[in-house]
Amino acid sequence: MVERVIATDAALQLIEKLKERHGPIMFHQSGGCCDGSSPMCYPDGDLIVGNQDILLGHIGGSPFYMHKNQYDYWKHTQIIIDVVDGRGGMFSLEGVEGKRFLSRSRAFTKEELNDLQV
């Protein structure tokens, strides 16, 4: 079955490093201003998820949430979390590593969309 959110090998390696350092972590992509449209990584529970946040799945065993307004734009795509060099959001855990998480995407095929509960 196709997943709504996946991560590259590089992102999964960084996720493991962050979990070793910080314990359980979580991801959230809000679509807000500034870095809000980037995936942000927090210690699990540091960000209170609301009823407008949708759990898209797990990457590296960590939950990945997206705000409903942002999801409405991305619901026809598979989110692919990658990592690149550089500084991202100042509150995101990976910043001190000189890395930042980045969302890429690809459109679902018609068959994949049929398999998903949209």
Image (cartoon, helix red, strand yellow):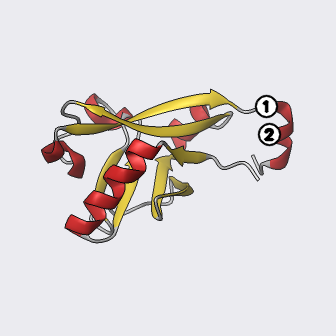
- Quickly name the residue at label 1: 109
Q: Is residue 56 above or below residue 113?
A: below
- Quickly name the residue at label 2: 113
Tag 2 secondary structure: helix
Between the C-alphas of marks 2 and 1, the distance is 6 Å
Tag 1 secondary structure: loop
On screen, residue 22 versus residue 75, left or right, reads: left
Residue 5 in view here: yes
Q: Is residue 66 above or below residue 82?
A: below
Residue 29 in view here: no
Outermost residue to the left: 96
Q: Is residue 32 above or below residue 24?
A: above
Residue 38 picture quarter: top left
On screen, residue 33 versus residue 95, left or right, reads: right
Cβ atoms under marks 2 and 1 closer than 8 Å:
yes
User: Is the residue marked by circle 1 packed among few (<14), some (14-19), or many (20+) residues within 10 Å?
Assistant: few
Front residue of 20/111: it is 20
Q: Residue at x 26, y 29 (%)?
A: 34
Q: Percent position (x, y) of residue 22? A: 22, 67
User: Is the residue marked by circle 2 packed among few (<14), some (14-19), or many (20+) residues within 10 Å?
Assistant: some
Q: Residue at x 47, y 65 (%)?
A: 61
Q: Percent position (x, y) of residue 79? A: 55, 38
Closest to the camera, between mark 2 and mark 1, is 1
Q: How many marks?
A: 2
Q: Residue at x 64, y 38 (%)?
A: 75
